[in-house]
Image (tube, rainbow, N blue to C red):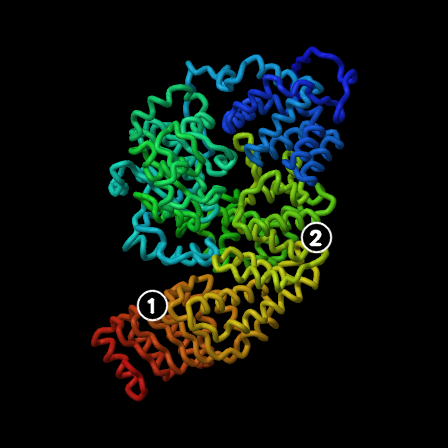
Amino acid sequence: MGTSVSTMAEGPNETEYPTTTKGMRMGTDPNSRITEFLTKWDDFQLYQLTKFYWDRLEQAIEEGVDGISSLLTYEKIFNGHEHRKVTELTDKGNRAESSKLLLSLVMEKGSRARRVMWESFVKVHHGVPKLDKIIKEIQELGSDPFVYMNIGRGLSEVPRHLKGVEQKHKEILRLTIISKVRDRTLVEHELLARGRDHEERRKNDLRKVLEKIRTDQLFQSSFSLRKSKSGSSAAVSGVPGIGKTTMVQKMVYDWATGKIYPDFQFVFSFKFRDLNTINCRINLRNLILFFYPYFGNVLGELWKNPEGLLFIFDGLDEFKDRIDFADNRRNTEPQSMCTDPECWCKVSDIVYSLIQHKLLPGCSVLVTGRPAALHLLEKAEISVWAEILGFVGDERKEYFNKFFEDQAVAAAVFKHVEENQILYTMCYNPSYCWILGLSLGPFFTQRDRKQQQVPKTITQLYSYYIYNILKNHGREIESPRDVFLKLGEMAFTGVSEKKIVFRNGDLIKYNLQPSQFLSGFLMELLERDDSIQSVVYTFPHLTIQEFVAALAQFLTPDPKDIQKLLSEADSEEDGRFEIFRRFVAGLSSPQSAWPLEAFLSPFLNQTTCPMIDWVKEKVKGQIGNTVTETGKRNLLNTFHYLFESQNKALAQATVGSVETLAFSELRLTPIDCAVLSHVLGLCDTIKHFDLHKCYIQCEGLQRLENVLYKCQSLRLTENNLGDSEVKLLSAILRNPGCKIQELKLCNNSLTVSCAKDLASALSTNQSLTNLSNNKLKDSGVKLLSAALRNLDSKI
């Protein structure tokens, strides 16, 4: 324990004065100088004042925190629930935490809340000695807040403008230049969308179209030659957990140590989640000084050479304000225009003006965010578009080798992942690999774990992720079920509102313990970020938030109409609920539920049974509705629900008698093919299977090879299939139980090398085959013609 030194303000004992609340009396001079100062100070000056005195205020208001909270509640700054949370902490003797919570809540609520708080300080300070000392100090220093906010800064000694940042990422993440914002609108979950595209783009586009780029090439390189005369802006996208913030940290570190961008004299890096705390008008000068106060009065010199400045804004998806670059009114409305570092405006106006080079023309700007957020930049003047693709090839294996000290365990875990395409394809994302490592590791290190219980679906994987947290921290809380229910309700609201950053006010709303009182149990589920004295919380990964939101549906003692909830979620066309619905379907499975039920008690049948009925009706409603791309995608999604549920009876009741499945011109990933394989494995009546132009390629065909023999008519045209894929098909055709009567393979990449093997298989199977528009040449055609002379084949 450290020793604290305190000074007592001189004054009479509080018992000699009438009080309005315990330990405080109302100020007797409403026209005091401090009251006059409050009316003179603008919102940003008051914001600075609060930050300047923050540490002292935490101590100063401890004795009067109940009364201040009452005044804030009376002025409708706090609601009753928030007031109770503050006073509950004081009742438990935790006044220090209570004062911290009060200040944090006020800062979250904005300018009016801060002003009312200071007015409350003026009313009660005579009865609170430490607060009284601060108020008197402000009165003595005068009405100019900048006088005392510059005290002790030591401007003559400017420290290193950038301090050490977080440790370099253990794995090298590659960036890929993309010529423009993704053509198609993202109408599905980003993690799935990128997983669907990842392997295809890695194998083909990186060779043919896209280019790899290093972080030191985003600016001042041949990639940024397209910059406008007024400066260069770059946008880097990536799904949650892919490494955007790590990339920014590395860039800043490498610049600060002289490794990259020597022509940039200064780099200013900001997180949008930190900018959210500035809920008042500000100018660029004060924005920089707020985060980098040691620049003092030298900023005017920096403005003279904007070409030497790089501004980085990380996490556009976390920004509370929407910046619409297509809105031309920004260029005509005076209140939105920001053309000078001294202009007072919203933070969003400053960011907009820097990116568009209306502010400090010539400077460079980097913006990062999730793919769905960067569509806002389509109309912006962006010189370089890039996307972080994550792990490719052997980098996935290398990650597990570094994650586990025991290389035998690493090999066993990776082997299980590699054999399960549902898990393997998602491993392009480092955060997902981390979840896999935490969840699967115990199965290969503990003797009491049965290998047949190793997770095979994503829902099972996340169930064991939560199971391990409960096992390690379960004793810290009396009712884990109650905590997960509250946390899940907050998580669901976040999914509904596309919200991934939560504050103390959010925790209080759902009756969770805010501030320092998060136990180790909750800290495994909510990462706390004490950034610029603003406390925020996030789930370690977006999918964990979605899983916890789904889990809450099975824990509520008064379950809502789950079918209605899912139908309402289904009406959202941007895909925000897609993974949530898959988790809900998966949690209806005993294999996913039982690890959690050991700690959370049995799941409710009132949720499980209606969930199964919803999946059944959903699949039946989509079968045959595959005329449009949306219809095909919806049917595929329902098959994912069937896979996650692992309910054989449900699958057979819904698709067991299906005769036709058509997914033509819908890009299918290996994950999709694995799901289709699972569904077709339970279907005994399939006749027509249409995969025209689905780009399944070799890996997708491998996922399907065990079930394709069931089809009578198989259409595989325009799938970029080659000779190696034909070997798989030839083996299927030779299968004595093969029912294929018509096989369409036109417009692929078959050559003469596969002709002999295919001719042999077709002679055995005698199926009608279309092989037009391949690369068989005359010799291949003659070979096949000879073998099929007695068949009605179309060569």
**Number of the front mark, 1 or 2:** 2
Give the image quarter of residue 620: bottom right
- Front residue (pair 219, 454): 219
Q: Tell which circle, 1 or 2, labels the residue nearer the N-terminal end.
A: 2
Quick check: 770 left or right of 525? left
Dot 2 corresponds to which residue?
600
Residue at 29% across, 36% down? 231
Measuring from the top left, give residue 156's x and y in whole percent. Answer: 42, 14
Residue at 44% across, 62% down? 670
Quick check: 333 left or right of 122? left
- Front residue (pair 165, 581): 581
Q: Could you say whether the residue bearing mark 2 is in a helix, strand or loop? A: helix
Quick check: 791 left or right of 650? left
> Residue flagged by tag 2: what amino acid is it?
Leu
Give the image quarter of residue 110: top right
Q: Residues within 10 Å of mark 2 (few under 14, many from 20)?
A: many
Measuring from the top left, give residue 274's x and y in whole percent. Answer: 49, 35
- Front residue (pair 334, 765): 334
Residue at 35% across, 71% down? 726
Q: Could you say whether the residue bearing mark 1 is in a helix, strand or loop? A: loop
Point out the image quarter for the C terminus. bottom left
In the image as oriented, which residue stretches furthest toward the bottom?
Answer: 790
Q: Is residue 175 in view from this perspective?
A: no
Point out the image quarter for the N terminus. top right
> Residue flagged by tag 1: what amino acid is it?
Leu
- Residue 556 drawn above or below residue 735: above
In the image as oriented, which residue stretches furthest toward the top?
Answer: 10
In the image as oriented, which residue stretches furthest toward the left?
Answer: 778
Q: What's the distance in space between the residues labelled 1 and 2, CA to CA?
A: 49 Å
Measuring from the top left, give residue 605's x and y in whole percent. Answer: 70, 63
Dot 1 corresponds to which residue?
721
